[in-house]
């Protein structure tokens, strides 16, 4: 199984690429919203504020340099995720609980 | 439509039987409504076509700031000024969402900027028309953003994941743009005789250029057929243009303004309006660079890029110096 970590870019003069994650208003997890270029983390957060939260979309921003993210490879989709398809007992609906037991 | 005349492979659409297994699996996934993500295998033609289309779309958003920025300092009230500023800022945001989505296909931001400035990449013909009066701010929001929405709403279902997700954000914001434009038109159409004349004049000048935004008829185009098979184009140009006319004519009637087309008539049989085509010779001429404002628009982008160079360099140098200091201190 392989994972892909993109190599650090060697672009002359171009600001690094940052991936942006925003937490919405209602206590949910940070969610990926897009990316942008910035010279450093501090400016990346400022830019993310302007690009991705112009309409109260969030209360917290994470940024991470794009090349630091490791991702599972698309070709591994089968071996990675299919095994769980057969494990239906992992879902609560697998178990029949008699109505007499009432709420559970 | 912010992307016009996008060339595809030019090879015509292959049938599933003509495809190698990898490409067939790719096409079947698209046919089933699945999404293609950045690291997935894709035909080279799909990648190139998308880079061209998304690049052109992004450039249109960026250049599209210029005709409206022209009126920010002369907006009639503080409220109108704040609204227009917010709209122009949104256009910058739309450009950035699209650039970052296009970058997932392996082109850099600087390469795209370079293509815009060299004229290799195009942007929508509409932004080469001047905005002469305040009423043009109304006409641009109402007609130009209205025409853009026609195309962008279906693109939320496009096959390329990052493009579709960018479109979802964009569509939410475009709706504000169109409404603010119509709001300006309502105010002027109900204003003094002079204001109403200005509103009518803006409609007269922007009507045909707005119809051109959809591009010439492409029912017979092999480029469009391929793009539609790949679901990076969802409707033909004529379908979208018809839909736009059908939606917009009653809005003009409500304003008490006249669409500048003597042949405009309701066609009961087709359930839509019959209307005159724009001057396609003019369209091709504007695309070639001979519109009223092509030179001015590109010069403004070039100046912004050149004048910003020292800022980009200085910020990068500062970031590198601070990173080095941090390493030294550890």
Image (spheres, coloured by chain):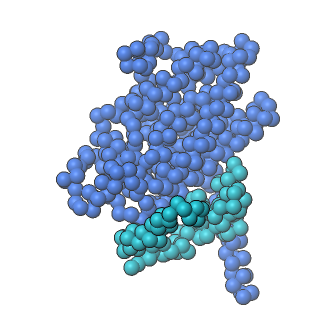
Chain colours: A cyan, B blue
Residue B309: x %, y % from top left: 64, 59
Residue in the foreground of this view, choosing between B209 and B238: B238
Judged from this view, the residue extending furthest toward the left is B17
Q: Is residue A2 above or below residue A62?
A: below
Judged from this view, the residue extending furthest toward the front is A100
At a point 69% along the width and 78% down the height, the residue shown is B323
At a point 48% along the width and 61% down the height, the residue shown is B104
Which quadrant holds residue B65? Answer: top right
At a point 56% along the width and 53% down the height, the residue shown is B97
Q: Is residue B77 above or below residue B25?
A: above
Residue B14: x %, y % from top left: 23, 49
Q: Is residue B46 left or right of residue B69?
A: left
Which quadrant holds residue B100? Answer: bottom right
Residue in the foreground of this view, choosing between B222 and B69: B222
Q: Is residue A20 above or below residue B281?
A: below
- Looking at the rendered image, the quarter that the C terminus of chain B falls into is bottom right
Q: Is residue B40 left or right of residue A100?
A: left
Residue B25: x %, y % from top left: 29, 59
Q: Is residue B281 left or right of residue A35?
A: left
Judged from this view, the residue extending furthest toward the right is B78
Q: Is residue B44 above or below residue B330?
A: above
Residue B45: x %, y % from top left: 33, 54
């Amino acid at each position: 199984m392989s994972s892909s970590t993109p190599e650090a870019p060697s672009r002359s003069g171009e600001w690094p690429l940052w991936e942006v994650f925003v937490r919405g208003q209602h206590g949910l997890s940070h969610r990926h919203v897009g990316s942008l270029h910035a010279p450093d983390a501090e400016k990346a957060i400022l830019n993310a504020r302007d690009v991705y939260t112009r309409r109260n979309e969030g209360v917290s921003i994470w940024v991470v340099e794009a090349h630091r993210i490791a991702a599972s490879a698309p070709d591994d989709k089968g071996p990675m995720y299919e095994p769980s398809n057969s494990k239906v007992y992992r879902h609560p609906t697998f178990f029949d609980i008699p109505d007499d037991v009432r709420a559970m | 439509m912010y992307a016009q005349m996008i060339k595809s492979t030019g090879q015509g659409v292959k049938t599933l039987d003509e495809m190698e297994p990898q490409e067939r699996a790719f096409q079947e996934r698209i046919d089933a409504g699945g999404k293609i993500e950045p690291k997935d295998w894709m035909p080279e033609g799909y990648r190139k076509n998308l880079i061209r289309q998304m690049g052109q779309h992004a450039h249109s958003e960026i250049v599209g700031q210029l005709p409206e920025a022209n009126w920010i300092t002369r907006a009639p009230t503080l409220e109108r000024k704040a609204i227009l500023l917010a709209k122009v800022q949104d256009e910058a945001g739309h450009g950035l969402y699209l650039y970052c989505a296009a970058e997932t296909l392996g082109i850099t931001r600087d390469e795209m900027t370079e293509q815009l400035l060299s004229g290799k990449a195009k942007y929508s013909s509409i932004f080469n028309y001047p905005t002469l009066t305040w009423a043009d701010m109304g006409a641009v929001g109402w007609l130009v953003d209205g025409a853009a929405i026609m195309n962008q709403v279906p693109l939320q279902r496009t096959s390329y994941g990052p493009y579709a997700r960018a479109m979802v954000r964009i569509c939410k914001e475009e709706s504000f743009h169109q409404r603010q434009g119509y709001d300006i038109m309502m105010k002027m159409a109900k204003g003094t005789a002079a204001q109403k004349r200005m509103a009518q004049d803006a409609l007269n000048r922007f009507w045909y250029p707005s119809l051109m935004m959809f591009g010439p008829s492409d029912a017979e185009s092999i480029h469009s057929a391929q793009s539609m098979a790949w679901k990076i184009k969802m409707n033909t140009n004529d379908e979208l243009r018809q839909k736009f006319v059908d939606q917009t004519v009653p809005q003009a009637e409500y304003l008490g303004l006249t669409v500048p087309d003597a042949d405009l008539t309701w066609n009961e049989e087709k359930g839509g309006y019959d209307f005159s085509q724009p001057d396609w010779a003019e369209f091709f001429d504007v695309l070639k660079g001979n519109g009223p404002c092509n030179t001015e628009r590109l010069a403004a982008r070039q100046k912004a890029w050149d004048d910003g160079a020292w800022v980009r360099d200085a910020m990068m140098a500062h970031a590198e110096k601070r990173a080095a200091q941090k390493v030294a201190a550890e």
